[in-house]
Image: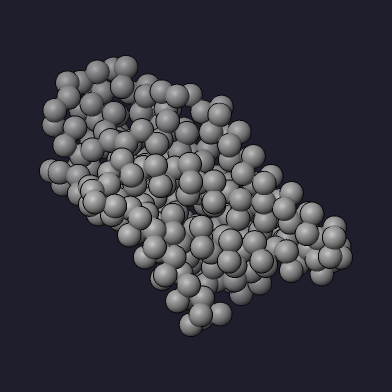
Amino acid sequence: MAENLLLAFGLTLMAGLATGIGSLLAFFTTRTNTKFLSISLGFSAGVMIYVSMIEIFVKAKDALVGELGEVSGNWMTVAGFFGGMLLIALIDKFIPKTGNPHELKKVEEMNNQPQNQNLYRMGTFTALAIAIHNFPEGIATFTATLQDPTIGIAIAVAIAIHNIPEGIAVSVPVYFATGSKKKAFKLSFLSGLSEPIGAIFAYFILMPYLNDIMFGVIFAAVAGIMVFISLDELLPAAKKYDEAHLSIYGLIGGMAVMALSLLLFI
């Protein structure tokens, strides 16, 4: 597990900084490639759902059943899974609606809107909302990579893909409000840093207690978080960008790629 430490931190940092990529795309492209976003978000959801249900949930169950026995282990796995869903749902509930990171923004909007100071507040809330969301995602990526780098890489890539449009969601309103690309990029970039902060939290707070039971509970919760994010965020967002069921094709493609990688590398 210790030998994967640098990889775990690196993947978490990469996933978090993808918000900055979204910001840069907003500045250096003239139109939003909706087909690409729809397929990519669907692909990300497919990876998350497949790896959560086929691999992460099973690993959590095996660990907990091995430590607690068949009945208690199964109950604890299910409790951890839905506990993860509840955690991310509560985070969603307490995020101000004006800062909802799922409110889609397009690059071309940057050239069509007047400056509006009220939008700066919305952009700030969006950045805060993304930062709050990214914190448990950082824990998930870090702990998954420590246990199994193949799963960690899959989660990191999926999270990075869905962080790109979130970076756009921060940049567009902040740019509207200030006219400053620098400020918009900075806020977008900072919102992604909570991902590696989540990894640091996991390392210093969780790792000293990371026995098989703790690992099983965390993995079950990670599976729940990933499934919730896929169903509540990624698929609805992909559908809004969707043209001709592209999001579903992306979803199936993500599942297929994840299945193939698990067959080849695990």
Residue in view at x 17 percent, y 24 percent:
113
The image shows residue 186 at horizontal and vertical percentages of 34, 39
The image shows residue 202 at horizontal and vertical percentages of 65, 53
The image shows residue 103 at horizontal and vertical percentages of 36, 33
Outermost residue, bottom direction?
264
Q: How is the image coloured?
A: one colour
Residue in view at x 41 percent, y 71 percent:
257
Image position of 162 with respect to 51: above or below: above
Observer able to see residue 238: yes
**Camera-side residue: 9 or 38?**
38
Residue in view at x 20 percent, y 20 percent:
115
Image position of 104 with respect to 255: above or below: above
Q: Quadrant of the N terminus?
A: bottom right
**Camera-side residue: 106 or 227?**
227
Q: In which quarter of the image is the C terminus?
A: bottom right
Image position of 132 with respect to 214: above or below: above
The image shows residue 212 at horizontal and vertical percentages of 78, 65
Left or right: 139 in relation to 34: right
Left or right: 206 in relation to 25: right
Image position of 106 with respect to 177: above or below: below
Observer able to see residue 164: no
